[in-house]
Image (tube, grey):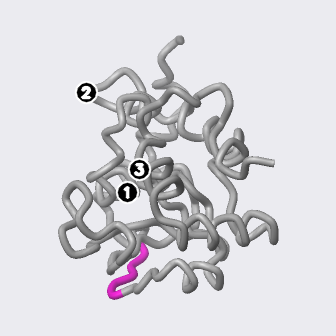
Amino acid sequence: MNVLDNLINEERKNYLCFDLLKKLYNEKPSFKRIIDEGFENGEVVGFPEELWNRIDDQNVRGIDSFEQIFKEGYNIGGCTVVSKQLSYSFRNCTLCSGILPLIAGTKNSPNGEHSWMQSDGIIYDTTLMLCITKPFAEQLGYQKEVEYDPHMSDIYMSTYEFTNDPTFKKSR
């Protein structure tokens, strides 16, 4: 069984968003070992179809769809913005930033600077395209420095309401 194939959505396997995951998995044996273990134990999964549906349901401005960001690979190096955009699909979540040493030296992360979203005990990493249980994240090296609830902001909530308003849905 190839774990990497199970982490990448078959329908979207050619999306550029998976490039960093593939690179780390194929070039860093320690990363591969931890991911394989997490997958086997149900602690690490790829973005499930239900999450892709949430992504597709978002109203966005300036681009055709939020999914386009992943198709073009703009999630890599854009973790803060992409995690925040993903958070609009969740009623209860927090946004986190800190360090993830294994991505040090990658696009926009010279020292491992990273951001992610958390909800119900799961880290949603929009750079690695993985859903990881919070306890297992420690094995990958996540070091949280800041965590906040964006729902406390009126500006965020206005965007949240627009993003999820079904009356604004484009026909696709």
Three-letter code, disc 1:
Lys
**Residue 80: x percent and y percent?**
30, 60
**Residue 94: x percent and y percent?**
47, 72
Mark 2, mark 3: which one is toward the viewer? Answer: 3
Q: Residue at x 44, y 50 (%)?
A: 23
The secondary structure type at the circle numbered 2 is: loop
Residue 68 quadrant? top left
Q: Which residues are magenta?
A: 145-149
Give the numbered dot on residue 62.
2
Residue tagged by mark 1? 84
Q: Residue at x 62, y 73 (%)?
A: 34
**Residue 164: x percent and y percent?**
51, 40
Q: Please name whichever residue, 165 or 18, is drawn nearer the observer in this view of the structure.
A: 18
Which tag, 3 or 1, sits closer to the chain's start? 3
Horizontal side of residue 89 vs 40, given as left or right: left
Label 1 neighbour load within 10 Å: few <14, some 14-19, many 20+: some
Three-letter code, disc 3:
Leu
Give the numbered dot on residue 20.
3
The secondary structure type at the circle numbered 1 is: helix
Q: Is residue 106 magenta?
A: no
Residue 65 higher or lower than 26, as above or below:
above
